[in-house]
Amino acid sequence: MNTRGFRSLLASAGIGATLAATGLIAPYAAAQEDPAAMIAYRQSTMKAIGGHMGAIAMAAKGDVTFTDEVAGHARAINQLSQNLTRYFPAGSGKEAGETAALPVIWEKWTEFEVAIKTLGTESAKLAEVAEGGDRTAIAVQTGELGNKGCGGCHKTFREKKN
């Protein structure tokens, strides 16, 4: 390495060390692991899933004629389900803030993972069924998604709403 390259490397290292020493990097790293922020993020994600489910249910019941949009909503739920377990790190239960997540999530983690996987499986099935456009088939699979997918978690792992 020539002298100029070495000086550039030292300058870069010096900038990184200065940022770390002044604490300018730390807030970013800490924000990624903040349990209260994780709770808020997963609640937003769950609300998004709920919004998709609401739209699907309206189409399945015939309240609206948008059965052509059900597959997109189901795919969105499926996509969101892919990372749900990472939104429940240890320490992000009631000890970290207001959440309906029950401690049983972390006590029975493997069962929780299975429940989340079922949400993905049932939403993928609904996306496939919805491509056919048959409102009856959509309604049946919407029920399966609600009972096995959403309900599979909510019955065991979520605090009941009053």
Image (spheres, rainbow, N blue to C red):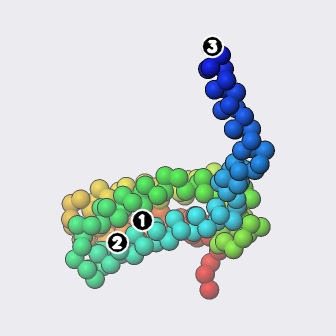
Q: Earlier in the sequence, mark 2 or mark 3?
A: 3
Q: Are marks 2 and 3 in contact (CB under 8 Å)?
A: no
Residue 5 percent coordinates (x, y): 61, 20
Residue 20 percent coordinates (x, y): 74, 44
In the rendered image of this protein, does residue 78 appear above or below residue 25? below
Residue 94 percent coordinates (x, y): 73, 69
- Which residue of the protein is positioned furthest toward the front in this rendering? 4
For the question of whether residue 104 can be seen, the reply is no
Closer to viewer: mark 2 or mark 3: 3
The crowding category of the residue bearing disc 3, from other C-alpha atoms within 10 Å (few below 14, some 14 to 19, many at least 20), is few
Looking at the picture, which amino acid does disc 2 mark?
A: Ile
In the rendered image of this protein, does residue 8 appear above or below residue 121? above
Instruction: List the residue tagged with mark 1.
Output: 145
Closer to viewer: mark 3 or mark 1: 3
Quote the CA–CA distance across marks 3 and 1.
Answer: 60 Å
Looking at the picture, which amino acid does disc 1 mark?
A: Leu
159 or 155, nearer to the observer: 159
Residue at image x 62%, y 13%?
2
Q: Earlier in the sequence, mark 3 or mark 1?
A: 3
Q: Are marks 1 and 2 in contact (CB under 8 Å)?
A: yes
Looking at the picture, which amino acid does disc 3 mark?
A: Met
Instruction: List the residue tagged with mark 2.
Output: 56
Label 2 secondary element: helix
- Left or right, 26 with reference to 76: right
Residue 60 image-quadrant placement: bottom left
For the question of whether residue 48 can be seen, the reply is yes
Instruction: List the residue tagged with mark 3.
Output: 1
15 or 74, nearer to the observer: 15
Closer to viewer: mark 1 or mark 2: 2
